[in-house]
Image (cartoon, rainbow, N blue to C red):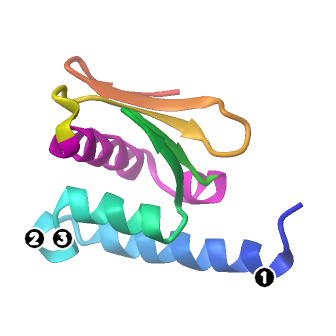
């Protein structure tokens, strides 16, 4: 069970992410790799295994479709940057494990 304060802090984090992506300029928000690294450090991305990223469900639910696509693309860039070779990513719900999105050679699919 998630505590009340942890729940509130996750909503605040989600609002900060939305504000960051709302700038729509990578130069202002930082590089895609640094954004994903920041999300991992803050606990918004709960786990990373190869090209699979488990994101906190509150963070994912607070994003628009456009921002979800950007997160998937940024995860693909993050994976490639750290030696993955391929430009791809899969995003899963951090609690249920349900596949939320994938990004690869044929573009982005949000489920």
Residue designated by label 3: 30
- Mark 1 element type: helix
Crowding near the residue tagged with mark 2, few <14, some 14–19, many ≥20 C-alpha atoms within 10 Å: few
- Mark 3 element type: loop
Residue 36 image point, x, y percent:
34, 58
Residue designated by label 2: 27
Quadrant of the drawing holding the N terminus: bottom right
The image quarter in which residue 99 lies? top right
Residue contact between numbered discs 3 and 2, judged by CB atoms under 8 Å? no
Crowding near the residue tagged with mark 1, few <14, some 14–19, many ≥20 C-alpha atoms within 10 Å: few
Going from the N terminus, do you reach mark 1 or mark 2 first? 1
The image quarter in which residue 102 lies? top left
Residue designated by label 1: 5
Whether residue 57 appears in this view of the structure is yes
Which secondary structure is most common in the magenta stretch? helix
Task: Kindly report the distance in space between the C-alpha atoms of the residues bearing marks 3 and 2.
Answer: 5 Å
Whether residue 108 appears in this view of the structure is no
Write the start and end of the magenta stretch as one range: 57-82
Using the image as rendered, state which of residue 66 and residue 104 is in the foreground. 104
In the visual, does 90 lie left or right of 105? right
Q: Which residue is painted at 27% across and 38% down in the image?
A: 76
The image quarter in which residue 34 lies? bottom left
Going from the N terminus, do you reach mark 1 or mark 3 first? 1
Q: Which residue is painted at 10% across and 70% down in the image?
A: 27
Task: Kindly report the distance in space between the C-alpha atoms of the residues bearing marks 1 and 2.
Answer: 32 Å
Using the image as rendered, state which of residue 69 and residue 91 is in the foreground. 91
Crowding near the residue tagged with mark 3, few <14, some 14–19, many ≥20 C-alpha atoms within 10 Å: few
């Amino acid at each position: 069970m998630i505590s009340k304060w942890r729940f509130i802090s996750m909503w605040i984090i989600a609002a900060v992410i939305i504000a960051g992506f709302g700038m729509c300029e990578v130069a202002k928000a930082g590089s895609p790799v640094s954004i994903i690294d920041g999300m991992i450090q803050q606990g918004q991305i709960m786990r990373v295994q190869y090209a699979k990223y488990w994101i906190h469900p509150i963070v994912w639910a607070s994003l628009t479709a456009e921002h979800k696509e950007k997160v998937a693309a940024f995860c693909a860039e993050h994976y490639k940057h750290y030696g993955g070779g391929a430009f791809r990513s899969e995003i899963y719900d951090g609690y249920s494990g349900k596949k939320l999105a994938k990004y690869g050679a044929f573009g982005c699919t949000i489920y």
